[in-house]
Amino acid sequence: IAGITQAPTSQILAAGRRMTLRCTQDMRHNAMYWYRQDLGLGLRLIHYSNTAGTTGKGEVPDGYSVSRANTDDFPLTLASAVPSQTSVYFCASSENSGSTNEQFFGPGTRLTVL
Amino acid sequence: GQNIDQPTEMTATEGAIVQINCTYQTSGFNGLFWYQQHAGEAPTFLSYNVLDGLEEKGRFSSFLSRSKGYSYLLLKELQMKDSASYLCAAMDSNYQLIWGAGTKLIIKP
């Protein structure tokens, strides 16, 4: 693989269910990010990780959790999905945090919570 | 608070020039990014400005005025494949990106 991959591509989920969105990058980037994109709004940061083993909260972290066990993987978990979490989720990475490096984005996961 | 403003939608003709404006207010400033996003796809990096002035990259140019909190993306010789949303994002003092809602550019033949 080259770049960032996300899985699944799309998912329909019943409210109250637990869901993990997967994200893997092979660029050996230190920093990774999870965004949600909703119509009429800019990308909003959910959680981020500056390096393996560390995570931080973004603008809209409630209802989501992340882990960063290694450099390549950065899964996002919805513990108990709600309809307001219906969105397109993008994972991104950059070479380093605290720098002006560009971010590279995965193809996105379209999630519908009913 | 932190805020990015850009027009919701613009229409232009194939072969013409279009300028997409962006104004920003952030806590500190570490540069201004432009990304392109085709419908149903991921954003892709176009340009980065941190100093005042114009940066040219092929058909695309980006301008920044730090004193005015203003940037624009200039697209020349428009092609149908330029139909996309263009996202403006300012980097704040914590190196976090603050994103605009995007400008949907429609190119007509």
Image (spheres, helix red, strand yellow):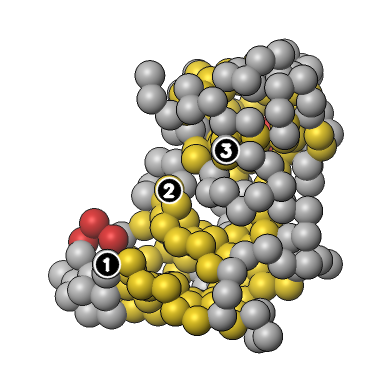
Give the mark toward the camera: 2 or 1: 1
Disc 3 residue type? Answer: Glu
* Residue A23: percent from left, percent from top: 56, 22
Q: Quadrant of residue B100?
A: bottom right
Above or below, B46 against B74 in this view is above
Q: Mark 3 and mark 1, same subunit?
A: no
Q: Are marks 3 and 1 in contact (CB under 8 Å)?
A: no
Image-based side of B35 in relation to B80, left or right:
right
**Residue ID for mark 3:** A95
In this rendering, position of residue B54 left or right of residue B67: left
Q: At numbered mark 3, what does the secondary structure look like: helix, strand or loop?
A: loop
Looking at the rendered image, the quarter that the C terminus of chain A falls into is: top right
- The disc placed on residue A64 is none
Q: Residues within 10 Å of mark 1 (few under 14, many from 20)?
A: few
Identify residue type, mark 2.
Thr
Q: Which residue is mark 2?
A: B44
**Which residue is found at the position 57% from the left and 19% from the top?**
A72
Could you give the CA–CA distance between mark 2 and mark 1, rounded to whole angstroms?
A: 16 Å
Q: Which residue is mark 1?
A: B58
Q: Position of residue A108 (x, y in %)?
A: 50, 33
Secondary structure of residue under mark 1: loop
Position of A66 relative to B86 (above/below): above
Check the residue under mark 3 and report the chain it is in.
A
Subunit under mark 1: B
Of tags 3 and 1, which is closer to the observer? 3
